[in-house]
Amino acid sequence: MVSQEQRRRQLAREKFLRQQQRRTEARRKSRIRNAVIASVLGVVLVGSGALYATGALEQDDDKANANAEVSPSAAPSKAPDPCDKPAEGKVESQTWKKEPAMSIDKSAKYTMKLDTTCGEIDVALNASGAPHTVNSFEFLAKKGYFDHSKCHRLTTNGIYVLQCGDPTGTGTGGPGYTIPDENLKDKSLKDNIYPAGTVAMANTGQKDSGGSQFFLVYQDSQLPPNYTPFGTVSDAGMKVLKKIAGAGESTGAGDGAPNATVVIDKATVTES
């Protein structure tokens, strides 16, 4: 008959093995990270994974402690939430069968204002360089598509972006239609760097697969020029992005949900 002490040790070993499996999987994902960078901003996310490489010393320590009892580790400290509570209301589920008809003036200037729980983010839109994208955003904003939606992803290692535009908050949502890639040879994209302040479309990694998800770059980020750049964040908006980034993300590995409660209370696109 198994004693309580033996049972306790057995449970500890099983727990340790589960942790080792998770660490092994994290190391595997870190090794392939560079190979999949082209889809790192994909609309469909397949787990965040660990973005930091694990050294050989940790592997040696794992072997040495294979039969040791595992003590619960302290949870990582979390920065205070710098943002306010969301406005009352909920996301409305809306989809459309095809891209909206072109209604914007390609020669005019447009501004997108994101009233978020963390502050106002103004974006100067490039209607001449990315007319399909700007037209789609004007359409979706008028429909209230972005209102009350969460910005679901923050990356803090390798690339530095806040990703928004999915009403489901899962990274898999979209408006039901796709828009073409545009402006991929914009003069601002030098040496495959999306400079801080750039607003660009996320996609699935396939051509012309953008929907409603977009990302805001808060620090220069090296990416292949596959993501339509269609706007630039104002100086005041950059301060808001920095505040959000400063609170970190949920996994501690550089890619996860923002610790800050980032909700777009209201999105508007206006012609100026």
Image (tube, rainbow, N blue to C red):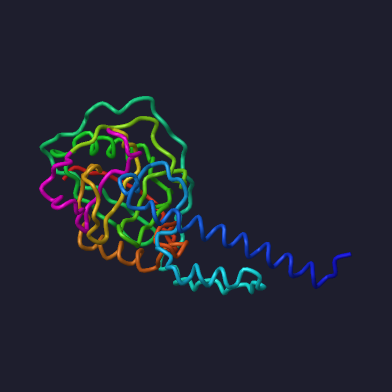
Name the foreground residue: 141 vs 23: 23
For the point 55% across and 71% down, the residue is: 75
Q: Residue furthest right?
A: 1
Name the foreground residue: 11 vs 230: 11
Q: Quadrant of the C terminus?
A: top left
Name the foreground residue: 107 vs 126: 126
Image coordinates for residue 129, horizontal then vertical, percent:
14, 39
For the point 14% across and 43% down, the residue is: 109
Q: Quadrant of the N terminus?
A: bottom right
Residue 55, placed above or below residue 207: below
Residue 205, placed above or below residue 256: above
Magenta stretch contains residue 139: no
Magenta stretch contains residue 191: yes
- Numbered circles on residues, count: 0
Q: Which residues are magenta?
A: 183-207
Image coordinates for residue 206, horizontal then vertical, percent:
31, 35
In this image, 215 relative to 234: left or right?
right
Location of residue 132 (image quadrant): top left
Location of residue 219 (image quadrant): bottom left
Image coordinates for residue 46, horizontal then vertical, percent:
46, 45
Residue 100, placed above or below residue 56: above
Name the foreground residue: 256 vs 60: 60
Image coordinates for residue 54, horizontal then vertical, percent:
43, 65
Location of residue 261 (image quadrant): bottom left
In this image, 188 relative to 206: left or right?
left
Task: Look at the magenta stretch and give its main secondary structure.
Answer: loop
